[in-house]
Image (cartoon, helix red, strand yellow):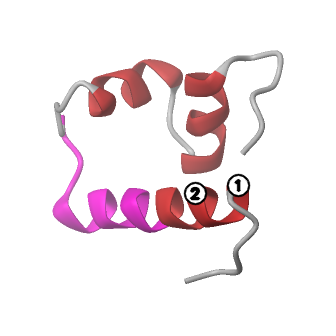
Amino acid sequence: MGVGVLGPLAEAGKVLGIRQTNVSRLMRGSKGAYSVERLIEFLKAQSVIHSASRGEGPT
């Protein structure tokens, strides 16, 4: 994922479908009110983003 004008947390929020402030909280280790299932969805999205940024296909 390239860093756009919005910045990396805002870009991540856009991909994950959550606000930048919630991305920041997740990055600091707070799971907040998210279910385990939703947190797993975030991890899957992060994995796809990471693979794409390295030029790999979906995992």
Indicate the position of residue 7 as horizontal and vertical percent values: 68, 18
Q: In which quarter of the image is residue 2?
A: top right
Q: Is 12 located above or below residue 37 in the figure?
A: above
Indicate the position of residue 15 as horizontal and vertical percent values: 64, 47
Q: What's under tag 1, amino acid-wise?
A: Ser
Q: Residue at x 62, y 57 (%)?
A: 49
Q: Mark 2 points at which residue?
A: 50
Q: What's under tag 2, amino acid-wise?
A: His
Tell me whether circle 1 and circle 2 mark residues in contact (CB < 8 Å).
yes
Q: Is 49 located above or below residue 57 in the figure?
A: above
Q: Residue at x 50, y 37 (%)?
A: 18
Give the numbered dot on residue 14.
Answer: none
Indicate the position of residue 41 as horizontal and vertical percent values: 40, 65
Q: Mark 1 points at which residue?
A: 53
User: Which stretch appears magenta?
Assistant: 32-44
Observer-nearest of 53 and 24:
53
Describe residue 53's horizontal placement relative to residue 41 as left or right.
right
Q: Is residue 6 magenta?
A: no
Indicate the position of residue 43 as horizontal and vertical percent values: 38, 60
